């Protein structure tokens, strides 16, 4: 185990649990193709976790993102054995309305194991 795991590994989860809000993380599942009907079925897995959501500052992202994109911080321990993918999505409440956003960029802070994820998501 790397030093970053020992020192910083336990920190994100309690902080995000305390200061974050509940979201539904939608892990893109496996695709299955029915050869008879020609229909592709995707089986997603929903996980309720806490996350901190902030608005992306376009200056810090070198202008690659759009106004309204979100930065989401998630403790790696909230998603054991899952590395976020750009196929994944999140659902969250904004002013009492359920919204969904697709992941467009993923940064993993890690040593030997992930410590936390910084995700950029675009509301749909």
Image: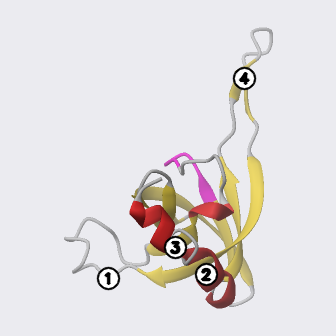
Mark earlier in primary sequence (3, 2): 2
Q: CA distance from mark 3 to mark 4?
A: 31 Å
Of labels 1 and 2, the one closer to you: 2
Q: Is residue 69 left or right of residue 99?
A: left
The region drawn magenta spans 85-89
When asked about the image quadrant of residue 93, the answer is bottom right
Q: N-terminal of the two: label 4 or label 1? A: 4
Q: Marks 3/2: CA distance?
A: 8 Å
User: Spatial distance from mark 4 to mark 1, Cα to Cα?
Assistant: 38 Å
Q: Residue at x 55, y 45 (%)?
A: 87
Residue count near mark 3 (Cα–Cα under 10 Å), binned few <14, some 14–19, many ≥20? many
CA gap, disc 2 and disc 4: 35 Å
Q: Which mark is residue 121?
A: none
Give the mark nearer the N terminus: 2 vs 4: 2
Q: Which residue is mark 2?
A: 16
Q: Position of residue 41 (x, y in %)?
A: 75, 30
Disc on the earlier residue, 1 or 2: 2
**90 in the magenta segment:** no
Q: Secondary structure at mark 2?
A: helix
Residues at marks 4 and 1 touching, judged by CB atoms closer than 8 Å: no
Closer to the camera, 112 or 100?
112
Q: Which residue is mark 4?
A: 32
Q: Residue at x 73, y 82 (%)?
A: 97
Alpha carbon separation for disc pair 1 and 2: 20 Å
């Amino acid at each position: 185990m790397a030093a970053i795991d020992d020192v910083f590994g336990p920190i994100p989860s309690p902080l995000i649990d305390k200061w974050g809000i509940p979201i539904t993380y939608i892990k893109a599942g496996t695709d299955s193709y029915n050869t008879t009907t020609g229909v592709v079925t995707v089986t997603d897995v929903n996980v309720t976790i806490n996350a901190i959501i902030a608005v992306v500052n376009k200056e810090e992202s070198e202008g690659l993102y759009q106004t309204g994109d979100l930065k989401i911080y998630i403790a790696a321990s909230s998603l054991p054995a899952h590395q976020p993918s750009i196929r994944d999505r999140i659902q969250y409440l904004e002013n009492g309305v359920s919204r969904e956003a697709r992941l467009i960029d993923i940064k993993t802070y890690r040593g030997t194991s992930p410590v936390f994820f910084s995700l950029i998501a675009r509301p749909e």
